[in-house]
Amino acid sequence: MTNDRFSVEGQTAIVTGASSGIGREIAEQFAQEGADVVVCSREQGNVDPVAETINEADGGTAIAVECDVTDRDAVDALVEATVDEFGSIDCLVNNAGASFMAPFEDISPNGWKTIVDINLTGTYHCTQVAGEHMRQDDGGTVINLASVAGQRGSPMMSHYGAAKAAVINLTTTLAYEWASDDVRVNAIAPGFVATPGVESQMGVSADDIDRDEVERRIGTSAEIADVAQFLASSASSYLVGETITAQGVPRIEETTEV
């Protein structure tokens, strides 16, 4: 027997950065479980195939919307299209993000601004606009994609880590402010995940990962999607303002007794 508290059936969810990787996996899993989803990316051609795949399968309906999350007008249009199509918004997944590796002294002002705008300001835009509908209606859930880089730092990614640290703080603060509006705000901080980008750069494929293996420090997009579904469902009703770390075996100081 399934536990209905873990269900997202009947919800309407917006998933940003849904053209591939974690965002696409979340959108497809939500739809398989009966949610209607709005998938967005900066390029319409990148999300049209995602919506087509979802609509060809059993489950919820999908629409694809071109949206640059750093553009407030584009975010307004995204939310308007969602409400026009489905009538309401129950869940927002702020997954859109970007980064590049560079030592701090080599990051240009434009490079810094670009990464902060996509990861942090984009989260601000989407949450403020979508949240207005949630707060006026029956509430909902906001799921922010943070990173372990925002929890403990990450060499060569100071701009990304700083932005994700801010997302974690925003998650806690906003969860407090919006609790009275029945909006739960939480975050996921993934560690190393075998996305298509990681596979192309490092040759690590999700197909090579055994989910039953405990001793590992690389996960799959499906494992992050499982956490997202939990946070979007009523099963996580007592989680408010939390950041769930998904990194496999924790990194700790190993000591040897003398």
Image (tube, helix red, strand yellow):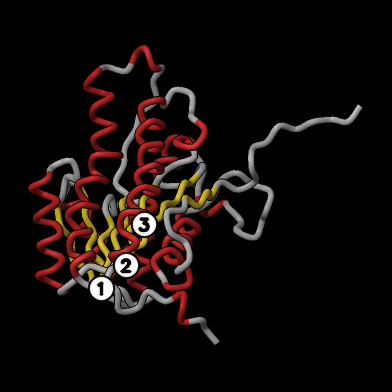
Q: Which residue is mark 3?
A: 185
Q: Nearer the viewer, residue 119 or 169?
A: 169
Please provide percent x and percent y for residue 112.
28, 24
Say if 70 sits above or below 153 in the image: below
Residue 182 marker: 2
Distance of label 2 from label 1 (alpha carbons)? 7 Å
Q: Residues within 10 Å of mark 3 (few under 14, many from 20)?
A: many
Say which amino acid is labelled 2. Answer: Asp
Q: Please tell me which of labels 3 and 1 falls first in the chain.
A: 1
Q: Which residue is mark 1?
A: 138
SS class, disc 2: loop
Where's residue 131, x and y in %?
Answer: 22, 59
For numbered disc 1, what is the local secondary structure? loop
Give the residue drawn at x 92%, y 26%: 258
| Circle 3: residue type | Val
Residue 140 sits in which quadrant?
bottom left
The answer to whether 157 appears left or right of 2 in the picture is: left
Q: Amino acid at mark 1?
A: Asp
- In the image as oriented, which residue stretches furthest toward the bottom? 1
Q: Nearer the viewer, residue 14 or 180?
A: 180
Left or right of 195 in this view: 10 = left
Q: In front here: 156 or 163? A: 163
Q: Is residue 170 above or below residue 201?
A: below
Give residue 234's quadrant in the image.
bottom left
Q: Quick check: marks 2 and 1 in contact, CB under 8 Å?
A: yes
